[in-house]
Structure formats: C-alpha cells, structure tokens
Amino acid sequence: YSFCTLLEHSNRVNMSLGMERALTFSYVKQLPRTTLEEVKQQEAVYDRQVLLNEPWVNYCHRIGRADRIPEEPQRDKWQTETWDEWEERKRAQPGLINAFFSDLKRREGVEAAAQCEKEEKTAKVLEEIARSEKERKKKLLPVLHTLLLDFEEKRKQEDTEVRVQLEDEETAARRL
C-alpha cells in the first residue's frame, strides 16, 4: 500500500466511526465520486464539515438566537463536534459530573468497607498468633529460677546482717 492509500483508508475508517474533525473543504473534494453511494457519502461529509467549521456567530444566526452572540469569547469547542453537539454536551455535563462524583463516593465506600474488613482479618490473625504463642509458652518447662533483685530489700538485709554481726560481737565481748 502507498501512503496515500493508507491515509485514505484511515480517513474512511474515521468517517465510519464518527471521529472526523474539522478539515478544509478541499479534503471533501478529493473524496471519490464514482458511485451513487460515494456521492451520497461525499455530500454527508461535506454537510458535516460545514457544521464542524461553522463559527459561533453563524450558529447563533442559524438557530435564531442572535442575543447569544456576545457569549462567543466563552465558547470553545472541539474540532470533532458541531455547535449543536457542544450545547448538548454542556447540557448533559452537570448530570455527568454528579454521576461521576456519586460513583466516586460509592467506590470510596466500597474501598473503606474492604479496608475495614482487612483490618478485622488482621486483628483476628494477630489474636490467633498471640493465643498460639501463649499455648506454646505454657507447654515449655517452667522456669526454675527467676532472677529478681530488689535493691531496697537487699540493703535492708545487709544492714540487718551487719547489725546482727555487731550484736554477736558485743555479746561475745561481754561474756569475756
């Protein structure tokens, strides 16, 4: 295939998908017109191109709403849509935005529920681990010696030992 053939094929595919964009009218004149079907297709493409290339002012005059002409600086449409499609999209936009945000809230709710469920499962697993660890420790031999040292008690014991030793020495010295 040559580049021109591929380009023509891609243009036909775009036309069949409704993804055409605003082009010059020389493009329309290059379309084949050998059969009645191709002539009808060319006329449809030409009509579509007229609508795609239509400026805002002409659109306002065509629909009989010349009072909307001052809104032109605020109007900007895609190359792939007509002004009618643009207005239809703008009318549907608030509903679509609300639907998007409600869907987003629904998804957040589902995700929050899933997160809570994961946290509950994690808590259960941790409880099970702690329980099995307790059981494992119970099965171990009990500890024979615990090394606890109370320094206050040790000081009292040492003081008592020193006092007892002194008393014993004193008692022994008096006997002599």
Image (cartoon, rainbow, N blue to C red):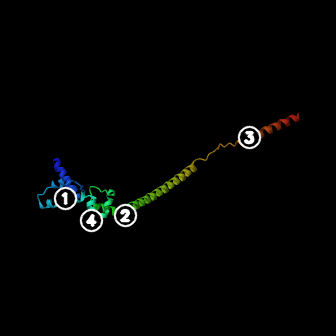
Q: Are marks 2 and 4 in contact (CB under 8 Å)?
A: no
Which-is-in-front pick, marks 4 and 3? Answer: 4
Judged from the image, the secondary structure of the residue bearing numbered disc 4 is helix
Q: Position of residue 76 (x, y in %)?
A: 31, 56
Please report whichever mark, 3 or 1, sits nearer to the chain's N-terminal start: 1
Mark 1 element type: helix
Q: Earlier in the sequence, mark 2 or mark 4?
A: 4
The secondary structure type at the circle numbered 3 is helix
Q: Are marks 4 and 3 in contact (CB under 8 Å)?
A: no
| 3D distance between C-alphas at marks 2 and 1 | 33 Å
Label annotation for residue 95: 2
Cα gap from disc 2 to disc 4, whole angstroms: 25 Å
Sequence-first disc among 4 and 3:
4
- 15 or 176: which is nearer to us? 15
Q: Amino acid at mark 3?
A: Arg
- The amino acid at mark 4 is Ile
- The residue nearer to you, when weighing 104 against 124, is 104
Q: Which residue is mark 1?
A: 46
Residue 67 point in image, percent of width and height: 31, 64
Between tags 3 and 1, which lies in front?
1
* Percent coordinates x, y for residue 163 in the rendering: 80, 39
**Residue 63's mark?**
4
